[in-house]
Image (cartoon, rainbow, N blue to C red):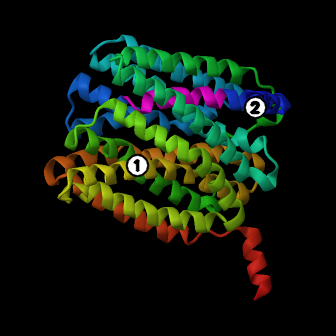
């Protein structure tokens, strides 16, 4: 099996191999950070739901500025931007590892980590699509996503083993994750992909893309509630430790290895509209689980439901690739793709910066269920706008049949 894997790696085109290696190492880093950050701020700073919500403003501010960053770096190849993004992730995590319980220093390194994490999102999508044939972009994005998810199992496993049985500190976890991201930057810097150096404008806004902008906005609201308050339900109401989140991420990663490629194939076969509609319905169910699991008379059953919501929601984040492939099929010019993806991230982060603060205040005043009831309404809006997705080729085919 190992020899077969090595032979397949040797058969990969050089740039694809380097990109896969970089995304895998970033997956390890992400697995270590995402499973521990909420417990880290809870244990280190003892935050309430309102303060936790407000923390998302500095964490998400770099996402809001993604289009600006991408514009300022327009002279760089996108593979270079990916390398610098990975470097920022690594240095941010290592900084968090060694600052101690200092609030303002934590905010600085969290922002650095966030800048790298957010800037690499549109670049990852555009480079991935550059490495794929036009008819197989969904498939290629699924393969890249599956690689990163599979690699995150390594990071999650390290968290699980070292924190559950060896009582490792957050400093050790963040140091290992940071080093993994820095090594990833070396692979990305080594890429040579001339077509990924787009002479892109600093900012692209077209009325033709309005539906993509709306979907990005709604995804930002849905995303941030679950990133911020989904784990907070498990931490503050059900008192779950960091290694539990590592186990849940491992479960999501194992399922994701199969789910992400299947999702990519579903996009290619059934179209973005169908995939996005199904996503909206499933998000509504996840909201119901998070909001009302505590009412179940059996605490074990309630925890099992919340675990399922956490894993399911992590898998559904992958549906964002359907929005990206939808945009790639309606762009007027190829060089609109990367800056519009960046703008989409900026739009969803405009709401991401404010929603957690509002959600935290709602939690403190009305209880955590109110946050997820409001998010269920967002899921319904996502369904309405997803039903409007139409692709030019398919629309023309439908009209010709009529």
Q: Is 33 within the magenta?
A: yes
Q: Which mark is residue 351?
A: 1
Q: Residue furthest left?
A: 365
* Dot 2: element: helix
Q: Which mark is residue 113?
A: none
Whether pointer 1 and pointer 2 mark residues with C-beta atoms closer than 8 Å, the reply is no
Q: Residue furthest front?
A: 1
Q: Is 7 within the magenta?
A: no
Q: Which mark is residue 5?
A: 2
Residue 327, horizontal then vertical, whole percent: 66, 56
Residue 13, horizontal then vertical, whole percent: 84, 32
Magenta residues, start to end: 22-36
Which residue does the image show at 30% across and 54% down from the upper left?
Answer: 290
Residue 40, horizontal then vertical, whole percent: 31, 26
Residue 131, horizontal then vertical, whole percent: 78, 40
Q: Which residue is more in the foreground, 152 or 141?
A: 152
């Amino acid at each position: 099996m190992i020899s077969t894997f090595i032979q397949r790696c040797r058969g990969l085109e050089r740039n694809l191999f380097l990109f896969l290696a970089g995304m895998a190492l970033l997956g390890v880093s992400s697995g270590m950070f995402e499973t521990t950050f909420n417990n880290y701020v809870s244990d280190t700073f003892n935050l309430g739901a309102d303060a936790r919500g407000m923390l998302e403003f500095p964490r998400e501010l770099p996402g809001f500025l993604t289009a600006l960053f991408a514009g300022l770096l327009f002279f760089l190849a996108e593979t270079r931007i990916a390398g610098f993004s990975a470097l920022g992730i690594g240095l941010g995590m290592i900084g968090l590892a060694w600052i101690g319980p200092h609030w303002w220093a934590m905010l600085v390194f969290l922002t650095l980590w966030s800048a790298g994490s957010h800037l690499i999102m549109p670049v990852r999508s555009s480079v991935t699509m550059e490495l794929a044939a036009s008819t197989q972009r969904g498939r290629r994005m699924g393969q890249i996503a599956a690689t990163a998810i599979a690699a995150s199992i390594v990071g999650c496993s390290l968290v699980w083993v070292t924190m559950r049985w060896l009582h490792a500190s957050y400093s050790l976890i963040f140091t290992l994750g940071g080093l993994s991201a820095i090594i990833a930057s070396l692979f990305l810097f080594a890429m040579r992909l001339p077509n990924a150096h787009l002479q892109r404008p600093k900012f692209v806004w077209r009325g033709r893309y309005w539906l993509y902008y709306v979907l990005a906005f709604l995804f930002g609201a849905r995303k941030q509630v679950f990133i911020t308050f989904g784990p907070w339900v498990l931490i503050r109401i059900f008192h779950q430790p960091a290694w539990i989140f590592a186990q849940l991420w491992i479960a999501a990663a194992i399922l994701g290895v199969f789910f992400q490629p299947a999702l990519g194939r579903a996009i290619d076969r059934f179209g973005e509209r169908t995939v996005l509609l199904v996503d909206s319905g499933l998000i509504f169910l996840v909201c119901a689980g998070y909001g009302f699991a505590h009412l179940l008379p059996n605490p074990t059953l309630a925890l099992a439901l919340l675990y399922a919501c956490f894993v399911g929601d992590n898998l559904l984040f992958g549906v964002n690739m359907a929005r990206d492939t939808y945009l790639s099929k309606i762009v007027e010019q190829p060089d609109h793709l990367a800056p519009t993806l960046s703008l989409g991230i900026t739009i969803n982060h405009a709401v991401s910066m404010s929603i957690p603060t509002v959600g935290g205040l709602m939690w403190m005043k009305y209880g955590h269920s109110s946050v997820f009831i409001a998010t269920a309404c967002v899921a319904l809006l996502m369904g309405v706008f997803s039903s409007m997705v139409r692709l030019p080729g398919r629309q023309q085919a439908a009209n010709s049949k009529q």
